[in-house]
Each structure stands twice: as structure tokens, then as C-alpha cells.
Amino acid sequence: IDKLVDGNSGFSPARAIELGQLLVDNGISHFEEPCPYWEFDWTKQVTDALPIDVTGGEQDCELSAWKTMIGSRVVDVVQPDILYLGGMCRTLEVARMAADAGLPCTPHSANHGLVTLCSMHLLRAIPNAGKYLEYSIEGPYSQQWADDLFLERPYKVLDGHVEVTDAPGWGVTISPVFLDKAHYAVSTAG
Ligand SMILES: [Mg+2]
């Protein structure tokens, strides 16, 4: 079992490095978002100081920010969220930038809706897929909204692995019952 820890933007560089040393001593291999995510210089101090993977990027949706983060090696592993970032094409662009810099990509996917499926497809499509698929353990109640989201069971976890479907599209059908119950809103550009 690999043990991973998420700091959720919670620490100063000095505190994150101190805590990170405890993580090293306890065999934790991945320290996510140790400092406020917009403080690239802070996070880089932690990345440079610790021998384990310092990771991040789930909040970042500007390609210019990604360019800085990857160009300055702020993190050891990039973690874009396909939905926060604005879709598959923009995330592939971030993954490509990371690949060019020799960095792995382990997407952020924090719920059991479409984002986990999209992340599986992305991981299969890129040469620098990280070691993990994030599978949310938040809940159980906070994930119930996604229980009947798809008509099919979209994937099965077997021995710690999932098989990505070759079916067209994402390989799933959104349940009409779910869509009927959904809240609809229209936004317009003025
Ligand atoms: Mg996180």
C-alpha cells in the first residue's frame, strides 16, 4: 500500500517542510498541495527541500499558471482536474507540457461522477500517466448523488486496477431519471 497525504493548501513553507520530514520518516511518498496553491514560490521551497513527491495543481485553470508551475518545477507531479481546467483538450495540453518537462500527471478527480471516467481515459492517452487514479473516498453520503448517474456500471475495480472501456464516447449513458431530476439553468453572454 502506498500512503499519500494532502495538505489542502494548509501550511507555510517552514511548517510544510517540518511536517514533510515526518511524512518521509513514516514512509509517505506523496505530499499534495502543502502550501496555499497560488503561492508557487512557497510550494517550490517544499518541493526542493523534501525527497518525496510534492504534488499539486487541482485548483489551477489558467494555462499561463501551468506554464509557470511546470517551467519552474514548482511540483514533482502535476494534478490538473479535467473539469475545473475546462475539458479534455486543455488538460491534454497541460499533460503534454508536463511530459516535455519530464513530470508525471496524476489528475485530480474528487467525485464518482464523470470526472473519474474522464480521468481514466486521459491516463490511458498520455505517455506520462502518474501511478494512481484518484478515486474519491469522501463520503459515503457525499457521493450518493452519483450512485444512479449512469445506466451501466461504468467500471469495476479489480485488484486495484480498472479497465478503461473501448465503447464510444465515455462508454456510459447518463440515466434519464437523473437528468429528469436535475436542475437546469441557462446562461447567456451579453
Ligand atoms: Mg487535493
Image (spheres, rainbow, N blue to C red):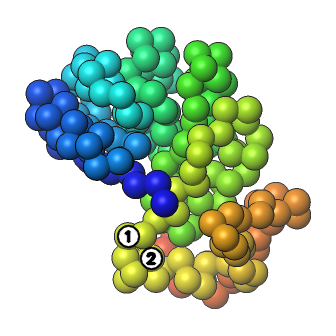
Please give the label number shown on residue 138: 1
Residue 109, placed above or below residue 22? below
Please state the horizontal and vertical placement of residue 105, each as a whole percent of the image: 57, 36
Whether residues under marks 1 and 2 lie with C-beta atoms below 8 angstroms apart, the answer is yes
The first of marks 1 and 2 along the sequence is 1
Q: Give the secondary structure at mark 2.
A: helix
Of 33 and 51, nearer the camera is: 51
Q: Give the secondary structure at mark 1.
A: loop
Q: Amino acid under label 2?
A: Gln
What residue is shown at x 62% (from left), y 30% (from top)? Answer: 95
What residue is shown at x 39% (from left), y 81% (from top)? Answer: 140
What residue is shown at x 75% (from left), y 46% (from top)? Answer: 124
- Choose top left, top right, bottom left or bottom right for residue 55: top left
Can you see residue 177? yes
Of 100 and 141, nearer the camera is: 100
Determine which residue is flagged by label 2: 143
Please state the horizontal and vertical placement of residue 179, each as a whole percent of the image: 61, 78
Real-space Cα separation, disc 1 to disc 2, in angstroms:
7 Å
Residue 170, placed above or below residue 51? below
Please state the horizontal and vertical placement of residue 143, each as a whole percent of the image: 44, 76
How crowded is the residue under tag 1: few (<14 C-alpha within 10 Å), some, or many (20+)? few
Q: Residue furthest right?
A: 167
Please state the horizontal and vertical placement of residue 117, each as a whole percent of the image: 66, 60
Q: Is residue 8 left or right of residue 95?
A: left
How crowded is the residue under tag 2: few (<14 C-alpha within 10 Å), some, or many (20+)? some
